Image: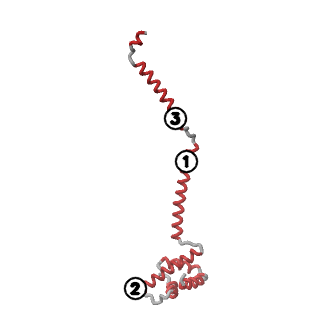
Amino acid sequence: MDRHFLEFWGNYLLSVARGQKQLEDMARWIHQGFKGTDEMTTMFKNYYGLEDYDRSNPESTSAWEKATVDFRKSFGDTFRSMGWISNEEYQTLKEENRALKNKLSAQDQTIKRLKSLLSQPVIDQNQTLNVLQDLIQKQGEEFQRLMTNLSPPTKNDTDS
């Protein structure tokens, strides 16, 4: 972590001990792009060496942007080291969790359906094949009888 952040943060935490309002101001200040709370902006400029910040100067603007990026990174790293996450990360994880729960529910339903199918009696393929062969044989015999009955009588049949 950078020394500027630690110095800023240490002094800020001492100030926070004096009142909850400052913590609320800090959150609002960060969300407003490090603007809006003169006391914090002044403290930030002091600890990051930006006392002479001039918005019209590209170098000064670049230094300001780098300081805000460094601050945000250190701020996030500090709270992550305490096990905290940002609201954005929380919302992302919450949505991911919801999607995974939906997927799990769908998979549970599929598993139940497959288990139900497996618990139903299974037809023995060999038995089915035997029944089919018997049916073919019977149909063949019936066909032979039909053909015999349909054919005209032969001379030998009439002589008897």
Q: Residue at x 50, y 80 (%)?
A: 70
Between 92 and 23, the one lying in front of the other is 92
| Comes first in the chain, label 1 or label 2 | 2
Element at badge 3? helix
Q: Residues within 10 Å of mark 3 (few under 14, many from 20)?
A: few
Seen in the picture, residue 4 relative to 83 is either above or below; the reply is below
Density class for disc 1 (Cα within 10 Å; few <14, some 14-19, many ≥20) is: few
Q: Amino acid at mark 3?
A: Leu
Q: Tell which of 29 and 130 is nearer to you.
A: 130
Q: In screen coordinates, is 43 left or right of 153?
A: right
Q: Nearer the viewer, mark 2 or mark 3?
A: 3
**Position of the C terminus by quadrant:** top left
Dot label at residue 58: 2
Q: Residue 36, image x and y in percent?
A: 48, 81
Residue visible at 56% across and 77% down in the picture: 78
Q: Which residue is mark 1?
A: 114
The residue singled out by tag 3 in the image is: 129
Q: Nearer the viewer, residue 115 or 144?
A: 144
Indicate the position of residue 117 as horizontal and vertical percent values.
Answer: 55, 44
Q: Marks 2 and 3, Cα distance to the nearest angstrom?
A: 87 Å
| 1 or 3: mark nearer the eye | 3
C-alpha span from label 1 to label 2: 66 Å
Q: Secondary structure at mark 2?
A: helix
> Nearer the observer, disc 1 or disc 2?
1
First in residue order: circle 2 vs circle 3: 2
Q: Are marks 1 and 2 in contact (CB under 8 Å)?
A: no
Residue found farthest to the top: 159
